[in-house]
Image (cartoon, helix red, strand yellow):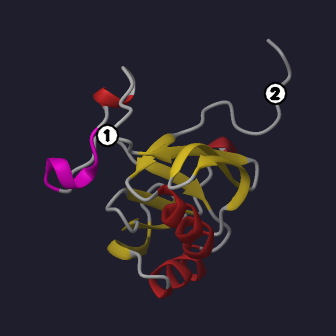
């Protein structure tokens, strides 16, 4: 196996307004822009980092649906439900939740101590995707 830096598993998301999502995710959650490849309103591919972790995202483009994108729906197309969620390790869940709340994140599960250790909360982003943020680090078992 090649030596890899950063995450080896990278969640990929789609947003109707990817430019707005990139700005909001950076402001609300503390992500940093690593790369953004866009053509006008359409973001073909973006990479945002958080510590050694990364997410990738792009625009929902109904005029240019690929075989991949036809298999993905937005939360509002399925009643606000999700089939997966991004989990992000943070240093202070209370502080992070306050930042997210101030930026307009909808907190759906308040910050609380977890039975398995750490503190965590769950929120929705500006387009309704679920995110879990917590201090529990599963690598420290």
Q: Residues within 10 Å of mark 1 (few under 14, many from 20)?
A: few
* Residue at the spot of label 2: 4
* Left or right of 8 on screen, residue 85: left
Element class at badge 1? loop
Q: What's drawn in magenta, residue-wise? A: 73-79
Q: Residues within 10 Å of mark 2 (few under 14, many from 20)?
A: few
CA gap, disc 1 to disc 2? 34 Å
Residue 66 position, x and y percent, is 39, 25
1 relative to 38, above or below:
above
Q: Which of 139/44 is in front?
A: 44
Does the stretch in magenta take in 68?
Answer: no
Q: Which of 72/96 is in front?
A: 72
Q: Quadrant of residue 6?
A: top right
Which residue is pictured at 36% across the width and 56% down the height? 129
Q: Are marks 1 and 2 in contact (CB under 8 Å)?
A: no
Which residue is pictured at 36% across the width and 20% down the height? 67
Does the stretch in magenta take in 78?
Answer: yes
Which residue is pictured at 55% across the width and 74% down the height? 28
Residue 2 position, x and y percent, is 83, 16
* Residue at the spot of label 1: 62
Residue reaching furthest to the top: 1
């Amino acid at each position: 196996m090649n030596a890899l830096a950063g995450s080896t598993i990278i969640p990929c998301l789609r947003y109707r307004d990817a430019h707005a999502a990139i700005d909001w995710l950076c402001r609300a959650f503390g992500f940093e822009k690593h790369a953004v490849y866009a053509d006008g309103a359409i973001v073909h591919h973006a990479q945002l980092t958080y510590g050694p972790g990364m997410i990738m995202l792009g625009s929902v483009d109904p005029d240019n649906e690929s075989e991949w994108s036809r298999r993905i729906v937005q939360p509002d197309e399925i009643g606000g439900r999700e089939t997966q969620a991004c989990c992000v390790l943070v240093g202070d869940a209370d502080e992070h939740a306050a930042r997210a709340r101030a930026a307009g994140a909808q907190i759906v599960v308040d910050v609380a101590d977890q039975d398995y250790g750490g503190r965590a909360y769950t929120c929705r982003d500006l387009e309704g995707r679920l995110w879990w943020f917590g201090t529990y680090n599963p690598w420290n078992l």
